[in-house]
Each structure stands twice: as C-alpha cells, then as structure tokens.
Image: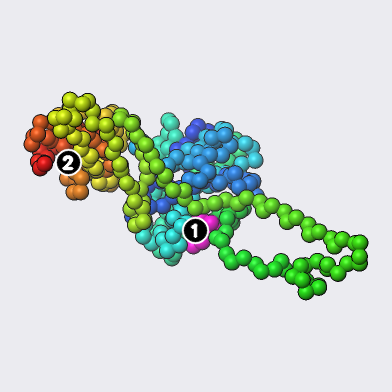
Amino acid sequence: MAELGKGANTQVGSGRITAELHVVGDPVDLSALLVAADGRVRSDDDMVFYNQPSAESGAVRHVAADGTGPERVEVNPSALPADVDRVVLVASCDPDDANRTFSEVKEVMVRAMQDGADPVLFRPPPLTDGERAVLLLELYRRGPSWKLRAIGQGYAEGLAGLATDFGVRVEEPEGPEESEAPGRLDVDGTGSPYDTDAPAGVSAPAPAPAPAPAPTMNLVKPPLGAISLDKGSQVSIGLDKKDRELVVTASLEWDGGSEQRRRKGADLDLYALFVPASKALRGGAKTPGTLVKAGHAPQGEPLRPGGTTDRARGTGGAGGQAKKGAAIQHIEAYSARMTERRPVLHPDGTIEMNGGPVEFKRR
C-alpha cells in the first residue's frame, strides 16, 4: 500500500479506479471535476457530485455512502475522451452551512484502488485556516499513460469558489430585485424606459425580450424525501449527525394478520437497533440484513480506519446505547407473552431474531 505525500505522484493503469473518502469528525462531501488542458471544465456537465452523479456516459461516477462502502468516485480512464486532460477529486464542507470548515474535521484520507494494484493513500495536511474545500488527488494523462498526483490545496471559498475557479457556473444565492434596468432612462416620466410621446400614428418601439438566463449549477443538497419499504426490502440513506434539523420518522403499517390472530391480541413491535460506526464491520460474507442463527460470528473489516475488529454481537435497542453496535434496522418479532426476546443487530449488519434480552410488556 503506497501513501503519497503532498505533491508526489505515481503511475496507474488504464483500468477503473475507485477513490474512497474517509474522514474523522465533521462529515464532508466528495466531488470530481473533468478538466481540459487549459485547466478549466469544458462545460458544467464536467462537475460530478451529489446533484449530478455521472459524466461522459458513466466514465466518471459519484456513489453515495451506502452499505457497501463510504462515499466514492469511480473513474474509467480508458473511457474518457481525448479532450479531458485530468480528473480532479475534491472534498468540501456542506455548502448549506458557511460556518463549517475543515478545522472540525480531524482527519481526511482518500484511498484510490485499482484491480491488480496496491491501493494509493493520501492524507492532506491539516487545514486550520478556515478552508472549506480541498483538492485531494488528480488523475492526469502523461503521454499514453495515467498518473495520480497528491495536491492538498485548500480553498476558503468552499465548493462554490473552487468550482468557479475551474469554470463551473455556480448558482448564486437569491438577492434583492433591482428596481430598474441600468443604463435606461425614463425619458417621459411614465416609468417606461421608452419614449411614449411618439407622433400620432407612430407606435413606440416595443422592448426587446430579455434573453433567458443560462442554467447554472445548483449546489444545494436535495431533501431525502420519503421511502416506502415492504417486508424484506432494504434501502441505505446517509445521515448528517451535525444537522440538528434533520429528522427521520419511521411509521409502521400492519393489518393485524389473520382474524384469529387479531382476536388473540397479536401485536407487532418496532425496534430501532444500531451499531456505532467505530464498531461496524463491512465486506463480510453475508449481506447486511441477512437473518442468522445463534452463534453467528460477525465478519468483515472496520467501517472506519482505526475501528475495532471486535466480533462480539451488537445489542443496541430502541432508545439506548448499543454495547457492540451502526445502521438502523427495523425488526418484527413474535413470541409468547412475557417471554419475547428482542432481535440482535450484529456489527456486520446481520440480524439474529429473538437473541436479545426479554422484553417485558404490560397491557
């Protein structure tokens, strides 16, 4: 595994490269810019990020963090057109909150991986002067070959300022409306910029229609929206713990089962089980959400660099801390009255039914 210092470079192949972003502290976003030989994007389509996740028919793709890995950008160098000279990877703070800087991000690391080659790591130097974005790596042409270079240059203006420097037209925040078009005079006191005191029978010239403004890149993050799940289905969503206005509401709908079960007072319980990110494992043999039996040994590597590889099972429950516990899982369980054991969410995302402590209920 090679680790680059700032300004260093290394040669890579022409196969697909996956660059993962790992951070400790405040969350940041990963973006990519397709840059021509003049150092600027060819158009706004060359910015790949959460609002525009693909360019050049998928040659560069943004993938949000999910159950299979952290936020990442995938680049297929052999599929890039000749006028793309380089692909620049960028990490940035939330553009919706101008108060966030990299001073709250304890560690930033990007890992670039390619089949048949050792991963390449880069950790930019600490950013403590109010930077809100940083250039991480650039994948650039060198004759018929490709190389990776570590950059580590910070930007105080954030993603908007950085993207603008590369030629992306970023949508400006809405400001006060202008009262009158500049450079036009009210020649007859009517409020119109045209002279309406024309001779009889002569129409005043009609104002020329204003050209439609060209669309610009919107950096505002879209809302998560609503997700509906049937029994057995799964979905991954990203949650920003620093956003105190973010609320996730889970609603459970159940028809009560059969009439016989309803008469016996059958109920359905909703659990919110979690595993702390420091304990979570990924890349195991079983897909998260898989039901396992007692005695299951969680498999996988730590979700975060430096995380524990403790294989003990997670026992987090609704409203409480998990002893070994990450992702939210909603579980249904049935058992005899006063003997119901709640489910267990293991660090690798697998689920063991009726493996937790007994839940005592009152009616």
* Left or right of residue 142: residue 16: left
Q: Residue at 61% x, 38% y: name it.
A: 143
In the image, is 246 to the left or to the right of 148? left
- Looking at this rendering, what residue extends furthest in the left direction? 338
Q: Which residues are magenta?
A: 156-161
Q: Residue at x 33, y 53 (%)?
A: 241
Q: Quadrant location of residue 184?
A: bottom right
Work out how far the residue at label 2 is from the one at label 1, CA to CA, in angstroms.
Answer: 40 Å
Q: Is residue 286 visible?
A: yes
Residue 261 vs 344, above or below: the answer is above
Query: Which element is circle 1 on?
Result: helix
Instruction: Give the structural element (helix, strand or loop) at label 2.
Output: loop
Q: Earlier in the sequence, mark 2 or mark 1?
A: 1
Q: Quick one: label 1, few (<14), some, or many (20+) residues within 10 Å?
A: many
Q: Which residue is mark 1?
A: 158
Say which residue label 2 marks: 315
Q: Does the CB distance between marks 2 and 1 fall below 8 Å?
A: no
Is residue 159 located in the magenta-colored stretch of the structure?
yes
**Which residue does the image show at 67% across and 53% down from the upper left?**
213
Q: Is residue 219 left or right of residue 129?
A: right
User: Residue 18 in the image: x percent, y percent?
Assistant: 45, 38
Vertical arrangement, residue 61 with respect to residue 190, above or below: above
Find residue 171 and report its horizontal and vertical position in percent: 57, 55
* Quarter of the rendering occupied by the N terminus: top left
